Image (cartoon, rainbow, N blue to C red):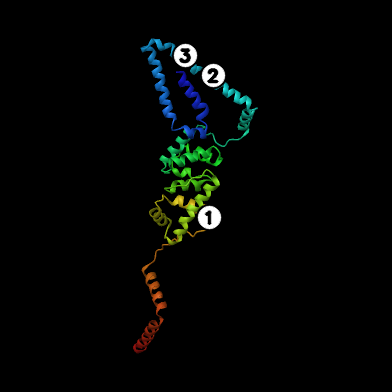
Amino acid sequence: MSLFFVFLIWYFLFVRNNPKVYEKVRSWVPKIFRGVILFTIIVSIVPMIIPLTFAGVIAFQGIGIYIVIFAVIIKFLRMLLGKGEAPKKKAREKTRKRETDLTRAVPKRIKIVRKFSERYNLNLTEQEIQRIVDASYMSPNWEKEVCDMQETYDTIFEWYRGTSGWLRAYLRVFPVQNVSSDFAMQKQICLDSFERIFSENPPKQYASVDECVEDWNNKYMTAFDETTFMIAYRFLQNNKKEFEMPSVDILRNQSEIDRLKEMYDRTAAADPEPVAEDSKAQDENLRRVQ
């Protein structure tokens, strides 16, 4: 069992909370775990079968204990040789005001983003999920996004609230996203993506927002609705990208007389001469009658 404990100490101290190390060894961790379990079972069964090897097993387990002790000593020496860097780092972490209470474990953050993507159909690839998680360790904005993904929402529209609604609308609407670890670059990506659709298919040519959204979704395989449309529209407007909204037809009730009068006025305006001749004929008929 000593080897198993060595593996656990190595994983929790050096791998689990270190994004760079975790990225390199994450595909090997399950294999190493299974191998350690299998090896532990073998060395536990063999002494029952071959008593002569019992002493060797004890010696091997003793070596495992020495490895654990050696790893703890190295960790302690690194802290001492760091000339107080570790205590200073802890002090900085205590004094730094954290905006989120997010787990430090890489696999847990990956699980949060993946689960949220599946629940709300964000279509994030494994590479994009990994990039978001990696960025959450260096960018407070991305850290806030991952933290908000672990919340429970009654509807996805609750998720759109906040200053990053433009990003969340982008992740929800587009079937293929471009994710950047730099939050300023991510904002530019979202701006360019929304502007391209608004420019290629101006909203003003449609009779309503619903008609515009339906056409866009058919052309670009997007998932726009009225809410995400307005989020994108205001996002572009706030960044000095102006677009005209769809024209709205005003419906009104008309009586039959008003309708006929309006039709007559249009006909008279289009062809005034026949109307004048008809007027003269009516005057002549009136004089004959008199």
Q: Name which of mark 1 and mark 2 comes first in the sequence.
A: 2
Residue 69's mark?
2
Q: Which of 130 and 90 is in front in this view?
A: 130
Residue at figure coordinates x 52%, y 28% from the top left:
14
Q: Position of residue 143 (x, y in %)?
A: 53, 38
Q: Are the residues at dot 1 and dot 2 in contact (C-beta closer than 8 Å)?
A: no
Q: Position of residue 153 (x, y in %)?
A: 45, 39
Q: In this view, does 119 lie to the left or right of 15?
A: left
Closer to the camera: disc 3 or disc 1?
A: 3
Residue at figure coordinates x 52%, y 26% from the top left:
13
Q: How crowded is mark 3: few (under 14 residues within 10 Å), some or many (20 or more)?
A: few
Report which residue position mark 3 lands on: 59
Closer to the camera: disc 3 or disc 2?
A: 3
Report which residue position mark 1 lands on: 237
- Disc 2 residue type (three-letter): Ile
Q: Against 11, is 122 above or below?
A: below
Q: Position of residue 164 (x, y in %)?
A: 52, 45
Q: Nearer the viewer, residue 71 or 279?
A: 71
Q: Name which of mark 3 and mark 1 comes first in the sequence.
A: 3
